[in-house]
Image (cartoon, rainbow, N blue to C red):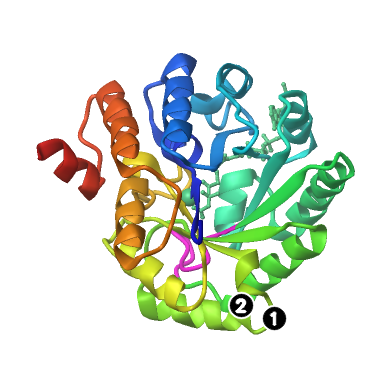
Amino acid sequence: MNVQIVEVGPRDGLQNEKELLPAQVKIQLIDKLVAAGLKRVEATSFVNPRWIPQLADAEEVLQGINRPEDVRFSALVPNVRGMERARASGLTEIALFMSASETHNVKNINKSMEETFPVLREVAREALALGMRVRGYVSTVFGCPYEGAVPIDNSRRVTDELLEMGAFEISLGDTIGVATPKQVREVLAAMLRDVPTERLAGHFHDTRGTGMANVAAALDMGLRTFDSSIGGLGGCPYAPGAAGNISTEDLVYLLQGIGYETGVDLNRLVEAGAYIQEQLGRELSSKVLKAELAS
Ligand code: HMG
Ligand code: MG
């Protein structure tokens, strides 16, 4: 496997769905994603259920899924309370997250950026002491829904802090899907001056149709880890207008076409996409899903 895919549909995808889905549907979805060969799955969030009601069933979902040993399951954790819930659910990997822009950070996690660092530091310390892996997300790297352009220095600062806390990998988020390949090259060039490519992942949303072009640019810059969402589900409830993540089906198709190995069986992935599309009762944005179901 020379490109790693982090499937974020069950978390980033479903967190934006207004109608609450039964835990059983999420469990079946995750089992199908794993059956398709995905080895990294962000299954849910341990955030305040009042903020994200859709993922209030995090414990139930993690308890219900098959957990093969060679698959890494993770969940978002915003604070020590979330960390405690993740530990109790038997997770061995968590993901910390914060924004590179002040206003989005406050809207998303109710704290200023400066207030957030010590909270995440404490969570990371506890997780690492328990032998867990810690991933870090930087949101709004390519633009903020409230502030517009975000200085690369902000993203660098957050990246450096998260790495210093012990994160093994930083996922750079285009939360509202505004990035273009030129900007991806610029941001990555600034990051890669001191951060090795294997410590970075691309997290693109396809709001303006540039998602796959951004993946191609990031591949050229040496990145080999990408987040994507089954069917192209997704968005961020605290980023108005953010559409879905790039779709896992489209990503796998692109990567296979270029000659990368992902370990994912596209036919089985399409089955997972078709399943969640049927459960949600509306057509999802994945182009490959649409094409495969039509053929
Ligand atoms: P707060 O309300 O300021 O928290 O929320 P608080 O510490 O004041 O606590 C208030 C109440 O919430 C308390 O309960 C706590 O126990 C409870 P009470 O005493 O009132 O009964 N609480 C919790 N309960 C369960 N689990 C917890 C938890 N924490 C507190 N972990 C907080 C602060 C950070 C918790 C809140 O703002 C929050 O949950 N935010 C999460 C929002 C979110 O999930 N956003 C979407 C994910 S980010 C994203 O999508 C971007 C990304 O995809 C990358 C990209 O695209 O760029 C990652
Ligand atoms: Mg996202």
Task: Say whether residue 167 is left or right of residue 170.
Answer: right
The percent position of residue 260, horizontal first and vertical second, equals: 41, 63
Q: CA distance from mark 1 to mark 2?
A: 6 Å
Task: Give the residue at mark 1.
Answer: 194
Q: In the picture shown, does residue 113 fall above or below 36?
A: below
Going by the numbered disc 2, the residue's amino acid type is Met
Q: Which mark is residue 162?
A: none
SS label for mark 2: helix
Q: What residue lies at 32% left-to-right and 47% top-to-bottom?
A: 249
Q: Nearer the viewer, residue 13 or 253?
A: 253
Left or right side of 41 for 97: right
Mark 1 near mark 2, Cβ–Cβ under 8 Å?
A: yes
Label 1 element class: loop
Q: Which residue is mark 2?
A: 191
Q: Is residue 252 left or right of residue 120?
A: left
Q: Residue furthest right?
A: 129
**Magenta stretch encompasses residue 231:** no
Which quadrant holds the C terminus?
A: top left
The quarter holding residue 16 reads top left
Left-right relation of 235 to 158: left
Q: Which residues are magenta?
A: 138-148
Label 1 environment density (alpha carbons within 10 Å; few <14, some 14–19, many ≥20) = few
Residue at 60%, 27% in the rendered image: 67
Q: Quadrant of ligand 1?
A: top right
Decide if residue 175 is in sight here: yes
